[in-house]
Amino acid sequence: MGLTGDELPRLRTPIPGPASRALAARLAAVESRNITRITEDGPIFWSEARGANVADADGNVYIDLTAGFSVAATGHANPWVAAAIAAQAARLPHGLGDVHPPDVKVRLLERLAAIAPGDLSITILASAGAEAVEAALKTALLATGRPGILAFTGGYHGLTYGALACTWRPEFRDPFRSQLFPGVRFARFPDPFRWDGSGDAGAGALADVRRHLDEAETSATPVGAVLVEPVQGRGGIVVPPPGFLAGLREICDERGIVLIMDEIYCGIGRTGRWFACEHWGVTPDILLIGKALSGSLPLSAAIGTPAVMAAWPPSTGEAIHTSTFLGNPIACAAALAQLDEIEGRGLVARAAAAGERLRARLEAWVDRYEIAGDARGLGLLQGVELVEPGPGRRPAGARALRVADAALRRGVLLLTEGPHLNTLAFTPPLVITDAQLDFALDVVEEALAAECTR
């Protein structure tokens, strides 16, 4: 089809079209039924993507407000990233991991040390974000000797067992609860819009943290790791109040606890800073990144301070934490090209500027539409939480899903997030044009206005 990446939608068929419907039928016959939701309304099947555009199997062209779960920061099929992948694949597609590593891995680790905040400089690479979470949790145990973990309500850290034990949502946890590590405690995340405690949300949440840590001291699993998202992504694009992350840093320092910040969703320029924690001037002991790190291939990283990472023993020829594809050279080359593109094209500043344009529209919706309860976020990681009319701020998940579905049928890809799926999430590629962003927001606003009349 030859997408340019800066196009407005072009729809040739009803959504989903016949090719997508045929693919859905074929997929249903060969994929576990728990993975892809297949109904009369979807899904569409992607066949091509570039910039902020996606084309489906029927030739319909969409504006993507998801960046493929926040991955395509420099745009889908970024030509420089694609060229780096092709060149590396032709030269060295695989190395010998932790025995005889590929040279490109060294360059990536040096680059991560250069861009990470504070003295974060020692890295464990992985593939999925959940693997980086588990590397960090292992590090914390080695560093403190304390197995307990404190995570937060609303948090999402992945679905492998160690990460799943720290993920809040019961629909993910409950089927496997009997096999999950029981030493995880959940403190309340300070969602200013949903805080129903007395006083300031940040202060109340920090008091809850201290309470959980105190209770854990007399248990079999005293806490050695605090795991937090600086901005919750799948939890509903929730930004904590000022002082909360700094308070966590202070508590962890007082008690000798490893502070882990999960920026797999919100990091790598998306919030208008390289890393979201920089908005508050707080540096963790371990920073987790993924998704937009390569913009294309499975790659994640746990970047720690020299002090905390020194808890790992030197390798004796058998690394006690590794994997076959750790530091895969193609993924490392993609990441280096991705970071070059973000830096060279000024996309961190672009995320901040486009984020201001986005926020103005979202806040106007809150003023105009009764069901738009709250607008929040940073840079190009923003959301609008929908609520039912009347008192109580009841989550309007069905409304949010209808808005997203209506936008899809107009050529705009939009996700809903949060425990009740009632937050419209805006996480487009950082290269989205102003014309594309304005068009997509017009489409979503029309769907929102129509929903208000139901």
Image (spheres, helix red, strand yellow):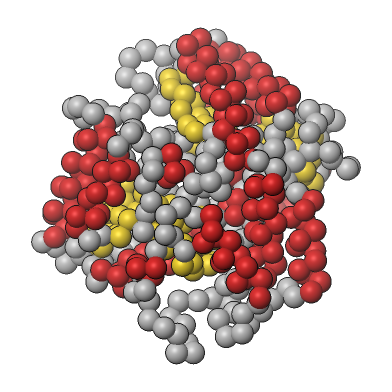
Q: Is residue 289 above or below residue 37?
A: below
- Residue visible at 20% across and 64% down? 221
Q: Is residue 287 left or right of residue 210?
A: right
Q: Is residue 269 above or below residue 297?
A: above
- Residue visible at 69% across and 30% down? 412
Image spot of residue 296 (x, y percent): 68, 55
Q: Is residue 321 left or right of residue 114?
A: left
Which quadrant does the N terminus fall into? top right
Most foreground residue, 259 or 229? 259
- Residue visible at 51% across and 10% down? 368
* Quadrant hosting residue 449: top right
Image spot of residue 361 (x, y percent): 57, 18
Can residue 350 be seen in this snapshot?
Answer: yes
- Residue visible at 25% across and 68% down? 144
Image spot of residue 140 (x, y percent): 32, 66
* Residue extending furthest toward the bottom: 316
Most foreground residue, 262 or 153? 262
Most foreground residue, 266 or 68? 266
* Residue extending furthest toward the right: 1
* Quadrant hosting residue 287: bottom left
Can residue 17 be seen in this snapshot?
Answer: no
